[in-house]
Image: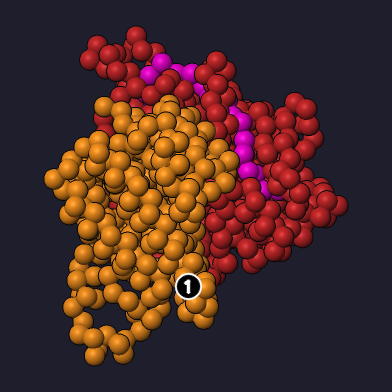
Chain colours: A red, B orange
Amino acid sequence: MTRLSGWGRTPVAECRVKTARNARDVAEALSEGPMIARGNGRSYGDPALSRGLTLSMAGLDRMLSFDAETGTLVAEAGVLLADIIATFLPRGWFPAVTPGTKFVTLGGAIAADVHGKNHHRDGSFRSCVEWVEVVEDGGAPRRIDRHADPERFDTICGAMGLTGVILRAAIRLRPVESAWIMQETIAAESIDAAIDIFEDNLDAPYLVAWIDCIGHPPRLGRSILMMGRHARAAELPPRRRRAPFDTPRRLPLRVPFNLPGFVLNAANLRLFNALHYEMGRRKAGVSLIDWDRYFYPLDSIADWNRIYGRAGFHQFQCALPLDTARAALSQMLDDISEAGTGSFLSVLKRFGKGEGRYSFPFEGYTLALDFPAGAHSDALIERLDRITLDHGGRFYLAKDARLSAETFHAADPRFAALRDLRRANGWADRFTSLQSERLGL
Amino acid sequence: MSKSVLILGATSGMARAIARSFAAEGHTIRLAARDAARLEPDRDDLVTRYGVTVTLHEFDALDLESHEAFVKGLPELPDIAVCAVGAMGTQEENAASPTIGASVMRANFEGPAAIFAHLANAMEARGSGTLVGISSVAGERGRASNYVYGAAKAGFTAFLSGLRNRLAKKGVHVVTVLPGFVATAMTEGLDLPERLTAQPEEVGAAIVKAVRQEKNVIYVRPVWRIVMAIIRAIPEPVFKKTSL
């Protein structure tokens, strides 16, 4: 038995773990009883923990082919986006959609149907997936093509591994001319102003805002918006133009142990957020920034999840419809302010049209917050759940560790259909996670 | 300069990582194992990631008669040969059944030594080459918990050391690798201490470096040098009563 958790480090479960190294291992694991596939453990809560078998896909980490004409990569599910970038960025290709960490597996990205800073233009991860190969029972893996079998394709993306084990996939990469991002930073005095800026800049390829979620107005809600696009080689300074895919090495940092609670106390959080805002405000304007710092600022700090100490932390992420987002966000900020439990990192993004039967994003705004685990945060997060529900919002399973089945289904009636589908196909007996049990999926 | 690297026992997780480390340096890779068709995804992976030439070769470490033909059948005598052949079994089975125990000894010692004997002779005749043998810290001192495996690895370690001595003036270098704990299929489910457990990628990187620097004996994580020095130093009357 192995003690496992998600990236939020809570809950922790004793799991029976095996590592799959080929398709046969997956079929064998399935024959042993209920299981769930686990990628690199970067979902925050309990979707990759199981009371049955937790099957690590780490051994299925081979890239199988690349078509340089179309940018199509075929790879096994355990390949990390970090490996894909290391291999293909020097050849001029980048993932078409990427979440805020590059340490996710291909299979995990599809199962959670992750999104990035370009959802408003490019959609979620599923939009770059051509086909997936899935093990759904003891039989041979089945290839599911997005065009040939859109129904079944839809039951994979966003279904959190509860409808089959993703073995391989073909994804399309995006051609880029350099490893650099042309970033434009704008400071916004309030969340309302931030939303105005979002709506005025929907043509920006990448768009994200960091929000100050500490303290009280006028600090609370002020934001730094970061727009970005892949820089063309010709836009680089001459010394970079010769090697447009070379970027400076970053010093590897590591949080060596669980930090004691006082490190992230209210005063330090305020200081951090004030500095962050001030730096963002001063840097406002256009600058070149390398891909790693732009897309994955936290990846440079290994084990950053330890900053919350032993108890771990909760991520709260909701999606809110366009027409209610302003009201919901301002109410959320009020509640956060009142609770005095600031969120260390708070991120706002604009979603474009939603796709897929079980995918999280739909047109509107998405807010991600994190809070140290504990009773004080729980009360606040439950209020945020309520505001989300009242405004027609929905929750992100990749972040969730604590929603009640009732709240989840009230917000997202689509998943009742998934539950029925799982029962009808026998998947409910084969694929179970602590999350699927908690949420009655 | 691109060299050719032969990986024997290429299906293991450790071998996969070793092959990647050499391929990342631009070397041509020859993957050899029983049922070599299983290695097709590994070949595709190396080609896709590193754009190097990779070929697959049928090789059975236990079929000693086939070794000579195997070496002759390779596209060329490799510049570097890595032997990652091995099998641990469980100590209970190895101890209970002398036949199973003997097969573990053959897989970890007899087979690897036999193929290296062929390669060593050919490399000696050519006057160049590097042999890398993956042995084990388990061979440093026999312990109740896995002495059958350990005895075989002890034999292989001694064989490598003798081979290194013999070939030292013939332009052929021999590297002995004692990886310590490595997170692979072989150790899955064992409760290994994190600080002592290397990831397969670390083994790959350590071997590439050892070959470049012509190291003789490497432990992948330096802490193992200390651990094993202590374990070797414990007097036998004390050691026999421990459970390590």
Nearer to us in this view, A133 or B204: B204
Identified at 76% across, 49% down, the residue is: A139
> Judging from the image, what secondary structure is the residue with disc 1 in?
helix
| Residue A75 in the figure: left or right of residue A271 | right
Furthest residue to the left? B169
List x then y, in percent, for residue B139.
Answer: 31, 68
List x then y, in percent, for residue B117.
Answer: 33, 51
Magenta stretch encompasses residue A119: no
Magenta stretch encompasses residue A177: yes
Task: State whether residue B75 is above or below residue B99.
Answer: above
Q: Chain under label 1? A: B
| Dot 1 alpha-carbon crowd within 10 angstroms: few under 14, some 14 to 19, many 20 or more | many
Magenta stretch mostly in which secondary structure?
Answer: strand
The reply to whether residue A284 is visible in this rendering is: no
Task: State whether residue A364 is above or below residue B229.
Answer: above
List x then y, in percent, for residue B108.
Answer: 41, 62
Residue, disc 1: B101
Identified at 51% across, 81% down, the residue is: B96
Nearer to us in this view, A175 or A62: A62
Identified at 45% across, 42% down, the residue is: B70
**Amino acid tagged 1:** Gly
Q: Which residues are magenta?
A: A164-186
